[in-house]
Image (tube, helix red, strand yellow):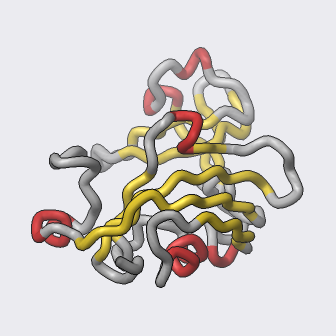
Amino acid sequence: MKAAKNTVVSFHYSVSERGAAEPLDSSRERGTPMFALLGHQQLVPGVERALQGREAGEHFEIDVAPEDGYGERREGMIQRVPKKYFQHADRLKPGMQTVLQTRDGGQRLVTVHKIGMSAIDVDHNHPLAGKTLHFDIEITDVRAATPEELAHGHAHAGDGHQH
């Protein structure tokens, strides 16, 4: 079966900044492939397009420009936030990534920019924004999505529903 919209693709990947030797992330290190329901915005656009039409067993490498990855870095994305909105604020250091508890009860991944006495300046840009990324991908399986996966808008790994 070929990968297309509403198919579930499982694949191993490693991602690095283009030209860098060490990967930033790798499913191979964790030992389990990633599962994605194509056509439902689960992947950066460049990777999703590269998977289209491919089959299990294919191995390929691609470079993804910022506009097809995590976007360009945007100025004005630094925000000063009271320390009470962070778990373990005393352990944070500039450059670290952390989860910010939002007012509406949600969460957002941010990068610590500067730490003050009562507040922390955080950068809301994605850590990989503005970077050209190199992906090494090996497709392990392509299958039709189940009705449950289509209803939920995401793939379920293995035989069950896992969130």
Q: Residue at x 31, y 74 (%)?
A: 7
| 127 vs 135: above or below | above
Q: Residue at x 57, y 77 (%)?
A: 50
* Residue 32 vs residue 39, the one in the foreground: 32
Quadrant containing the C terminus is top left
| Farthest-out residue, top | 90
Q: Residue at x 63, y 44 (%)?
A: 25
Q: Horizontally, is 145 left or right of 91 in the view?
A: left
Look at the image and tell me whether residue 109 can be seen.
yes
Q: Horizontally, is 23 left or right of 9 in the view?
A: right
Tell me where residue 58 appears, x and y as whole percent: 56, 67
* Residue 1 vs residue 121, the one in the foreground: 1
| 104 vs 44: above or below | above
Quadrant containing the N terminus is bottom left
Q: Horizontally, is 124 left or right of 143 in the view?
A: right
**Which quadrant of the view contains residue 22?**
top right
Tell me where residue 49 appears, x and y as whole percent: 54, 81
* Residue 75 vs residue 96, the one in the foreground: 96
Q: Residue at x 78, y 55 (%)?
A: 17
| 58 vs 120: above or below | below
Look at the image and tell me whether residue 74 can be seen.
no
Tell me where residue 140 appears, x and y as whole percent: 45, 57
| Farthest-out residue, front | 57
Tell me where residue 154 appears, x and y as whole percent: 27, 63
